[in-house]
Amino acid sequence: MAEPEGLGLSLDSLIARQQEKQQRQQGGGYGKQRRGRQDGQQQQEWRGQRQRGGGPRGSGGGGGGRQGEQWGRPQQPMQQQHYNLRQQQQQQPMQQQQQVEDPTAYRRHQSCWQEDDGSVIFRFRQTNLVTIDPAGNITLDAGGYYNGVTLASMNDALNLIGIRVTCPGGDVRNDDWSVSDGRTLTRFEDGVVLPAKGPAAAGRGRQLLQAFNNPHHAQQAAAVAASNAAATAAGILPFTGFVPPGIPASRPLPVGGRGGGRGGGPRNGSGGGGPSVFSRLGGKAGQQQDRFAPY
């Protein structure tokens, strides 16, 4: 009969031998378990690479699946950040353009009221552009601000009562301004007075006040301007109802009658087929031209 293993060993040797055996068993089991996890993880990675269309050495766009994951993920937020930056840069000029393109924003600074003495005042910011006394005399004052906004604001009020201010030279800052009521021209300067003509002129202040307080006064002013332009084209009003930029205010525009006008044949040796506007009003053309001269 064989002698049992370890019979001749001391107790300490048996304990040390048993501990060594247990350590070998535990280490081997942990190693197998870790290898099993690595194998499972590697299989999952291989499956993911096959779904993306490539492997570690595959051709096309799928090669280096692990490397693609490492380098591809940080690039997505960078691309999104650049896209957002470009989008903001494109939106900022559009927003600024929308803010600049409002042509009627200056009208928020306009006001019109009636004083205790019956005078009607039209103010833009801190300047009383138009003052109409009870008799109908109109005083105009730009306050020294000769620019396009002042000119437009003054016309917003005057067009409501059939008067307009123009700049024949086209340069509103440096060229002279002219005031027209459809019959006469007056050179504009700060404090110029347009005298009332007839008893009907006494109602011009009330007319301005009512028209300005009308919520559709802008459309009304445009309608008055269109009516004056049509009357000028028909010869009912002289050319001074509207002075295009670049046309001297003292020189009348040729307005042809029936069969004449723009592109018509000669008229009395000087072009046009019908009588001039000034002959319709009576008198000679030269006398009427002197009458409408602004200076």
Image (cartoon, grey):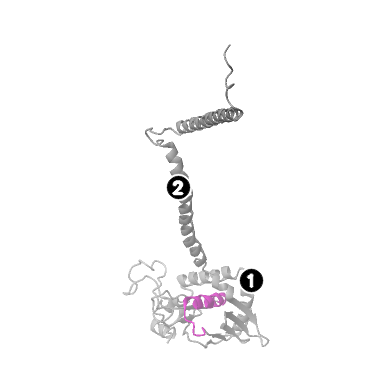
Q: Which quarter of the image is occupied by the N terminus?
A: top right
Q: Which mark is residue 40?
A: none
Estimate how packed mark 2 is, as few (under 14), some (14 to 19) or many (20 or more) residues with alpha carbons within 10 Å: few
Q: Position of residue 131 (x, y in %)?
A: 58, 84
Q: Position of residue 78 (x, y in %)?
A: 46, 51
Q: Which of marks 2 and 1 is nearer the N terminus?
A: 2
Say what secondary structure mark 2 lies in: helix
For the residue marked with disc 2, what is the amino acid? Gln
At 48% from the left and 64% from the top, the residue drawn is: 97
Residue 86, compared with residue 171, is above or below; it is above
- Would you say residue 146 sits in the magenta stretch? yes
Q: Residue furthest top?
A: 1
> Which of the two residues, 11 or 270, is positioned nearer the viewer here?
11
Please, what is the dominant secondary structure of the magenta stretch? helix
Q: Which residue lies furthest to the left in this view?
A: 269
Q: Residue furthest right?
A: 116
Tell me the magenta residue range.
Answer: 142-161
For the residue marked with disc 1, what is the amino acid? Asn
Residue under numbered circle 2: 75
- Would you say residue 147 sits in the magenta stretch? yes
Q: Where is residue 195 in the image (x, y as percent from the top left)?
A: 55, 87
> Which of the two residues, 122 or 227, is positioned nearer the viewer here?
122
Residue under numbered circle 1: 214
At 55% from the left and 70% from the top, the residue drawn is: 105
Q: Which of marks 2 and 1 is in front?
A: 2
